[in-house]
Amino acid sequence: MLGICRGRRKFLAASLSLLCIPAITWIYLFSGSFEDGKPVSLSPLESQAHSPRYTASSQRERESLEVRMREVEEENRALRRQLSLAQGRAPSHRRGNHSKTYSMEEGTGDSENLRAGIVAGNSSECGQQPVVEKCESEVSWIPNKHYSGIYGLMKLVLTKTLPANLERVIVLDTDITFATDIAELWAVFHKFKGQQVLGLVENQSDWYLGNLWKNHRPWPALGRGYNTGVILLLLDKLRKMKWEQMWRLTAERELMGMLSTSLADQDIFNAVIKQNPFLVYQLPCFWNVQLSDHTRSEQCYRDVSDLKVIHWNSPKKLRVKNKHVEFFRNLYLTFLEYDGNLLRRELFGCPSEADVNSENLQKQLSELDEDDLCYEFRRERFTVHRTHLYFLHYEYEPAADSTDVTLVAQLSMDRLQMLEAICKHWEGPISLALYLSDAEAQQFLRYAQGSEVLMSRHNVGYHIVYKEGQFYPVNLLRNVAMKHISTPYMFLSDIDFLPMYGLYEYLRKSVIQLDLANTKKAMIVPAFETLRYRLSFPKSKAELLSMLDMGTLFTFRYHVWTKGHAPTNFAKWRTATTPYRVEWEADFEPYVVVRRDCPEYDRRFVGFGWNKVAHIMELDVQEYEFIVLPNAYMIHMPHAPSFDITKFRSNKQYRICLKTLKEEFQQDMSRRYGFAALKYLTAENNS
């Protein structure tokens, strides 16, 4: 009898001390040497040719297959040429086309994200990459009904796509949950013997037995076959066995009768194994407990402490019918709530390689005085935050006239309600940095998926910066959002502002009018605010001026911080019909449109205070002209005060430290820019 209730508390407590990995990563790579000095023979398909049992008819069949294989190779080369040409015309972030007919049966699982692991990568430092041939073309000739589309076949080409010096690899589907240290699975490689090159768990459904329904005709497999949601691959031996030729010939032969795959790569792996059973080392089934509707998964464990890997290998995922599905669902949701920072330590026996940047940061951090009353402020500058770029699908098609502008902003969970309104006001691309905990990231995902407005927009880049420390790293967030834009210009805004209708197109025209491509200008979008939670948004400048006169709107921060926007010269803006230049003044912090190569925000400023002021000061010292746009405006919407502004107002030490950081920033400016920066000290003393 399964001790689910008895073991649940024990398992959850133990799991906190293990490397519990929600399966957000498709592939785990770790190179090493396999200690086996025996020579590896060629593929059995080749060795059969020298066997007395190899008949003339078999020889003819092989020759026929090889001819067909050469035809397919030629088709692949033509397809690659077409893809290359199409890639030159298509936007760089556009998705490939997926098959429209999918099998709704269990199989390898959630493989539709394989492209992210193989082609795109997920590095926070990735820039524009040169156009390369996509490895999808290697398998695009295979008809496939699986719901993962073409990406469900990508595991077949790992020997070709992964580095030649990589000897061993663990391949994981994205819909698995690890309930143990993955190092335990890595150790299984040492149990491989002879020509065993694949580590797999037996399939736990009757799919390959062919008895699920009348006329069910699966691909050939040994008994129940094997599930490819978890695979241990010896890449070096597979390459020597000519794996590419082996699976291609097998697939060609079977497709003559089967016409298409139903379970993507899993069908082809099993057909190869049927002919060459010696290739497989069968893993214990607790390494891939399969939770599709009709499986024998409960035979893999007696108690929850037996579980190693849980595999949601059904298109229904968490809605699958299974005896213990409620327990597994709660376990999965518990993992989602974990603080990922708990896993930010070196794995046992796996020290990280020395990183120069990391060492420099540690050195600077060690030089800080922990007795300094502003130590926590200074320390924040050296905090390295986990970052997940492009958390949701992003797709951007460059504008033909090179005038495109991205709206840049940052936010936390309490400002999430502004996203839909901004998307309705701004049709252009948006780059957002969201400061969230791991649990909040999941809440955001559910929120976004439930919003028709957000799901209909693919030109919004969402970049998650995970919470760490006690301050809101506002300027770090802005820098993350700025760094990952796809346009030549950016509108540096804040999440609690709604741009006027049509501002996106107006800014693109202004870019040309003011020749931003060849001059250092910062175009100012005048900022206003309302104290009303419900506002009939003005559809024109005339309507906005009328609302100003009636007291429905005010110039931004008119009541509390006039200096921040006074240089915009709102009196002149009321009657202006052409752009006009204004001069920098102390504490000026307008919202501007600039080229993407403008300076970053200074990271020393966190929370509330001086974060935008310092940036505008640096634009001024670099001789940017400030140009006010006469027919542009944005309106700040009311909201509850942030935690940081509350700390600023209530904590004297907070204000003292902010003043100290401000003075240090001005001194740094003087050192970097010399005489040109002296005016900022003078202006500050006179303000």
Image (cartoon, rainbow, N blue to C red):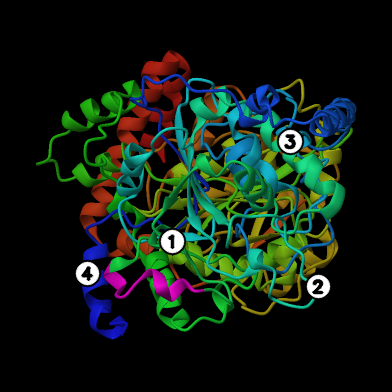
From the viewer's side, name the closer residue of 111 and 33.
33
Task: Residue at 81%, 72% (x, y): give it.
Answer: 215
Residue under pointer 3: 248
Horizontal and vertical percent position of residue 421: 70, 67
Disc 1 on helix, strand or loop? strand
Answer above or below: position of 586 versus 288: above
Task: Residue at 72%, 74% (x, y): give it.
Answer: 550
Residue under pointer 1: 177
In terms of sequence position, does the residue under pointer 1 or pointer 2 come before the other? 1
Q: CA distance from mark 3 to mark 2?
A: 27 Å
The amino acid sitting under disc 1 is Thr
Horizontal and vertical percent position of residue 457: 75, 58
Mark 4 is surrounded, within 10 Å at the Cα level, by few (under 14), some (14 to 19) or many (20 or more) other residues, namely few
- The quadrant of the image that shows the N terminus is bottom left
Residue under pointer 4: 13
Q: Nearer the viewer, mark 1 or mark 3?
A: 3
Q: CA distance from mark 1 to mark 2?
A: 34 Å
Answer above or below: position of 478 versus 249: below
Task: Residue at 79%, 33% (x, y): give it.
Answer: 58
Question: Do labels 3 and 2 touch, CB within 8 Å?
Answer: no
